[in-house]
Image (cartoon, rainbow, N blue to C red):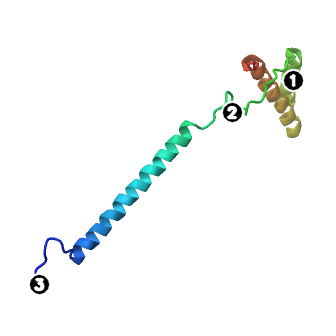
C-alpha cells in the first residue's frame, strides 16, 4: 500500500501530538510568566515596609541613667556577682542602646 500525500501515518500522528503537547505547554508557561510579572508590577507598596506603616515615636534617653547602669554592671563584674543579676544589668544597657538608636535614626511620619 502506497501512502499518498493527504494520508497520515501513525508515526506522523504521534509526532504531531508530541509537538502539540510542547507548544501547548509553552503557551501555558508564557501565560503564567506574564501573570506573575503583571501581579508583581502592580502589587501595592508601602512607604515603610519593615514597620508596616507603624508610627515610630522616638523616646528620650536619660544618659545619667545609662552611666549609672554602666557603673553598676562594672561593679558587678568586678565583684563576681550573681549571673542572673549581671544578665539583668546587661539587658538594661542593651535596651538603652536600642532607645538611643531610635532617638538618633527615627524619622517622624508626615
SS under mark 2? loop
* Pick the front one: 73 or 13: 13
Q: Quadrant of residue 17?
A: bottom left
Depicted 98 relative to depicted 34: above or below: above
Residue 3: image location, x then y, percent: 13, 77
Q: Which mark is residue 50?
A: 2
Q: Residue furthest front?
A: 6
Marked residue nearer the N-terminal end (2 or 3) = 3
Depicted 85 relative to depicted 67: above or below: below
88 sits to left or right of 15: right
Task: Choose mark 1 or mark 2, whichever is in front.
Answer: 2
Marked residue nearer the N-terminal end (1 or 2) = 2
Q: Check disc 3 and report the residue beneath it.
A: 1
Which residue lies at the image location 83% right of the left edge and 25% below the top edge? 74
Crowding around mark 3 (Cα neighbors within 10 Å: few <14, some 14 to 19, many 20+) is few
Q: Residue furthest left?
A: 2
| Residue contact between numbered discs 2 and 3, judged by CB atoms under 8 Å | no
Q: Residue furthest bottom?
A: 1
| Residue contact between numbered discs 1 and 2, judged by CB atoms under 8 Å | no
Which residue lies at the image location 51% right of the left edge and 46% below the top edge? 35
SS under mark 1? helix
* Pick the front one: 28 or 76: 28
Residue 73: image location, x then y, percent: 85, 27
Marked residue nearer the N-terminal end (3 or 1) = 3
Cα distance in 3D space between marks 1 and 2: 31 Å
Task: Choose mark 3 or mark 1, whichever is in front.
Answer: 3
Q: Quadrant of residue 22?
A: bottom left
Q: Check disc 1 and report the residue beneath it.
A: 69
Residue 63: image location, x then y, percent: 85, 15
Cα distance in 3D space between marks 3 and 1: 102 Å
Amino acid at each position: 500500500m502506497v501512502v499518498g500525500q493527504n494520508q497520515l501515518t501513525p508515526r506522523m500522528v504521534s509526532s504531531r501530538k508530541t509537538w502539540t503537547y510542547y507548544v501547548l505547554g509553552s503557551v501555558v508557561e508564557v501565560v503564567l510568566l506574564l501573570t506573575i510579572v503583571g501581579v508583581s508590577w502592580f502589587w501595592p507598596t508601602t512607604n515603610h515596609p519593615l514597620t508596616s506603616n507603624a508610627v515610630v515615636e522616638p523616646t528620650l534617653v536619660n544618659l545619667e541613667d545609662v552611666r549609672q547602669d554602666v557603673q553598676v554592671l562594672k561593679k558587678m563584674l568586678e565583684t563576681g556577682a550573681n549571673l542572673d543579676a549581671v544578665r539583668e544589668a546587661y539587658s538594661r544597657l542593651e535596651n538603652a542602646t536600642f532607645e538611643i538608636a531610635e532617638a538618633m535614626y527615627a524619622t517622624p511620619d508626615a
